[in-house]
Image: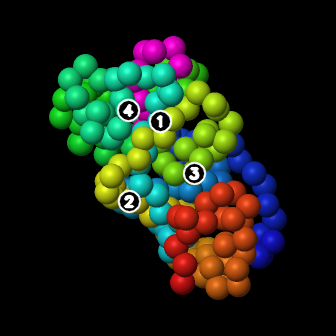
Amino acid sequence: MDLGSKIQYVDSSFAKLVDDLSTDKCDVAMFAVGVLPARAKVLRFSQPYLQSDIYGVTTRSNRTVKQWADIDKPGVLVAVQAGTFMEPVMAAALKQAKMVVVKPPQTREQELESGRVDVFMTDYPYSRRLLDNADWAKLVSPPQPFNVLPYAYAVKPGDDAWLKKVDEFVARIKKDGRLDAAAKRAGLSEIVIRP
């Protein structure tokens, strides 16, 4: 591998991210980790390689949420996945709608399809994957940037040499075209941060 390490995949999640890194369950989180201020206090990040805004996903048949302006209205139930960057952002942004934090084993999709929520908030990568696989889903995009967040690889604090190695890897894949190629295969070219 380019980082000079043997790859061993570790099952993790946004909710377990800090614990998994700080307890050495894994050495690096490489699953589009949003660089949040709270995370930056307890983790170290490489240079960012992607960036995403927040998007809404509703059903095509939903009569309550048809556009972005419909989200923060009285009576609207807005779902966010526990531990994602959407949780603190939407908690601060919603003034009239009610936020519903979805924790496993429930999913935002189940809550939306069942009618228990009107919309759920997600990022560009997840929305693309969902829209490619769910004919019932409708994307609700903000009319202007709402909360664009950079994504980077995360490591635990205290190992500056490892962070430097990870950061150099990100710089190389940006420069040599591997990041662009991977993003194109995944349908994420629109959100790549280029050198």
Please tell me how crowded label 3 is: few (under 14), some (14-19), or many (20+) other residues with Cα within 10 Å. some
In this rendering, position of residue 160 left or right of residue 142: right
Residue 125, label in figure: 3
Residue 148, label in figure: 2
Residue type, label 3: Pro
| Contact between labelled residues 3 and 4, with CB atoms less than 8 Å apart | no
Pointer 4 or 2: first along the chain: 4
Question: Which residue corresponds to mark 1?
Answer: 57
Q: Could you say where residue 178 lies in the image, as x and y percent from the top left?
A: 72, 75
* Kind of element beneath mark 1: strand
Q: Could you say where residue 188 lies in the image, as x and y percent from the top left?
A: 61, 60
Q: Is residue 146 visible?
A: yes
Please tell me how crowded label 2 is: few (under 14), some (14-19), or many (20+) other residues with Cα within 10 Å. few
Select label 4 or label 3 by which is in front.
Answer: 4
Residue type, label 2: Val
Residue type, label 4: Lys
Image quadrant in which the C terminus is located? bottom right
Q: Could you say where residue 57 lies in the image, as x and y percent from the top left?
A: 47, 35
Q: Is residue 109 above or below residue 149?
A: above
Q: Residue at x 66, y 42 (%)?
A: 132
* Kind of element beneath mark 3: helix
Pointer 3 or 2: first along the chain: 3
In which quadrant of the rendered view does residue 126 lie?
top right
Residues drawn in magenta: 112-121
Q: Residue at x 22, y 29 (%)?
A: 73
Marks 4/1: CA distance?
A: 10 Å
* Kind of element beneath mark 4: loop
Select label 4 or label 2 by which is in front.
Answer: 4
Indicate whether residue 119 is drawn in magenta. Answer: yes
Pointer 1 or 3: first along the chain: 1
Q: Residue at x 78, y 55 (%)?
A: 8
